[in-house]
Amino acid sequence: MTARELQAWLRAGFPKENERYEWKEWRSLKSNISGRKGEDLASYISALANMDGGCIVIGVQDGTLAVTGIQDFADYTVENVVHRVLGKTPGLPSMGLRVQELRASDTGAVVWLVHVPRHAPRELVLAHDRAWQRDGDSLVELREDRRRAILTELIAGQDWSAQIVAGATLADLDPAAIAKARSKYTEKHQSERWAAEMAHWSVEQFLAKAKMTTHGQLNRTALLLLGRAESVDWLSPQPAEILWKVPAERIALPFGPPFVLTTTEVGQRIRNPNIKFFPETELLAVELPRYDAQVVLEGLHNCIAHQDYEQAGRVVVEEWQGYLRLTNPGGFVDGRPEDYFEGRRTPEKYRNPRLVEAMRLVGMIDRGGFGIRDMVTTQRKRYLPLPDYEGSSANQTVFTIYGQTIDKNYSQLLMERSDLPLEQVVWLDRVQKKHRIADDQAAALRRAKLIEGRKPNFFVSAHVADATNTRTQYTRNKGLTDHYYKTLILQHIQKFQSASAAELRALLLDKLPDSLSPQQKLVKIKNLLAALRSTGLDGVRIGVVGTGKNARWEVR
C-alpha cells in the first residue's frame, strides 16, 4: 500500500481515539516505550488493557492518521518489544500482545500496530506501579468504579449463590417461606408428568428439586430465599438486605430473608394511589394504580437474582415523586437491557446461575429473557413512560419505574395508536425523556410524523391526527364539542316548540363519537340535557313538561 492507501486503511480500521484506539506520532521509540509515566507505551497499554483491550497506532499524525513513520527505533524490534513491554506491565496477559509492522510502498514509512489484550479476569494491569484507564481519548489513573468493576467481574464457572453454607441446617429456614415456595413450585409444575409425586416429597427432596441444596447441603440460595431473618449471619460479610426508602420523608426500613416472603412486604410498603388519564377519544377517564404490582415485583426479583453479592452491597428501593428507583450492586451481565425489550434475546449467562434457577422454579422470575419485555409491554398498555436502566454502570444496575406522565403527547399517542411497533414506542420514550436516539431512528419517526424538532432537541408530535394519517376517523372517534351538541338540541326544540326524549336521541346518536358504546352514548345525551336544564347555554335553559310518554322538552 502507498502512504495514502495506508492512511485510508488505518482510518477505516481505527477511525477515532477512544477507549479502544490510540494514535501516536512517535518518530523515535527511544524514550517512548518505557519512559515518563502516563505518557509512554507501557502506560497506554495498561490503560487499554484495563478497559477491553484495543490497538495503539504508532507513526501516524494525530487527528489525520497521515503516515509519518517511525524514524528512530533505538534498539527495539517487532520481536523484542513485546517481551520488554511485558516486563514493564505487571498483570498483562502475554497471550494477545503483539506488534504488527506496516510499511508504505512509496515512502518506506513504517507504522506499528500494537495490539493490546484485555486484562485477565479480576486482575489489574499496571505500569509504573499504577493502574491506568482510558476516559474517552484521555489517559488517566484508574478510577475507583472501574477498579471495582475489574476486581469483582464475573468469572465463568464461579457461582457465589451455589456455594455450600457449612453448618447451616433446616432449622435455619423459615417454615412459612418453605410452605410458600412449595406452593408456588407446585403451581408452576402441575402439568408435569411427575406432578402427583410433589405432595409426597420431604422437605429435603423439595429443596433439592428447587436447587436450594448442593450435594445435600444448604447453599446460599436457600438462605437468601427461605432463611430465617437471623440466617444472614451465615452469609457475612455479604449482607442480604433490601432497603425501602422515601428520601423526601426521611423514611428507611430494611428487609432481609426470607426473600420469597419479604419482597411482597416491600411491594406493599410502596405508596400506590390511583391516577387518572383523560383520553381525547373517551368519555370517561382511565383510572389505574400508579404502579403495576407485577412490574414492581419483577423488577425487585431481578435485583435479587442478578446482584453482585461479592460487592457486599444491598438492594435499594427508593420512592420519589412519580417514580420508583431500584438499584443493586453489579452491572448488566449479558448484553444491554434494551436488547431484551422485545423478548428476542435469550440470556446466555448469569452472575448467579443457581439463584436464578431456584427463583425460576418457584415462579419469582422468568429465565427466558421475557421478564423485561413483559414489564415494558405492561407499562406501554398503561400509557406511561417505559421502565428504563438509565444511570446503570459496570458496578451497579439502576432500574426506574415511572408512575406519572412525562409528556402528555407521548401518552396520547399510546392511547390513539395501539398499532405502533414496540421499537418505535421505545424510541419515542427516549425522545420524551430527552435521551438521544440514532439518526435512522429519528428519520423513521419523522417519516411517520411522530416527532418534531431538530436534532438533538426532538419532541413527541402533538398532531395526533396527522401522525395517524386518519383525520376523518380521528374526528369520528373524538367527536365534536359539547357546545355543538347543546346548540343542536336548542335549535331543534326552538324550531318545533318542543321535543320528546326519543326525538333528541335520534337527533344525536349518529353524531356522537364512534368510540362510545351505545350505552355510553345514551348517558352522554342524558348528561347534555341535564346540563341544559341546570346551567343552559348562552342564557337559554330547557325543562320538561308533562310526565311519562307525554313528557316533552321545552325552552324556558
Image: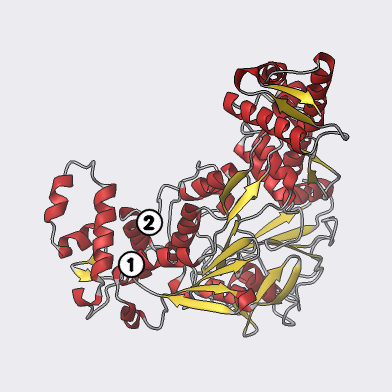
Of the pair 211 and 362, the residue shown nearer to us: 362
* Residue 183 place in picture, x, y as percent: 25, 55
Q: Is residue 159 visible?
A: no
User: At 29% across and 68% down in the image, what residue appears?
Assistant: 226
Q: Is residue 109 visible?
A: yes
User: At 27% across and 76% down in the image, what residue appears?
Assistant: 165
Quadrant location of residue 556? top right
* Residue 145 place in picture, x, y as percent: 61, 75
- 367 versus 280 height, above or below: below
Quadrant location of residue 497? top right
Badge 2: how crowded within 10 Å, few (<14), some, or many (20+)?
Answer: many
* Residue 480 place in picture, x, y as percent: 77, 28
Marks 2 and 1 close (CB-CB < 8 Å): yes
- 218 versus 504 height, above or below: below
Disc on the earlier residue, 2 or 1: 1
382 vs 503, left or right, is left
The residue that disc 1 covers is: 225
User: At 11% across and 55% down in the image, what residue appears?
Assistant: 200
Of the pair 477 and 414, the residue shown nearer to us: 477
Tag 2, which secondary structure?
Answer: loop
User: At 66% across and 33% down in the image, what residue appears?
Assistant: 417
- Tell which residue pokes out farthest to the top in this image: 496
* Residue 231 place in picture, x, y as percent: 31, 79
The residue that disc 2 covers is: 364
| Amino acid found under the numbered disc labelled 1 | Leu
For residue 164, which numbered disc appears in the image?
none
- Tell which residue pokes out farthest to the bottom in this image: 129
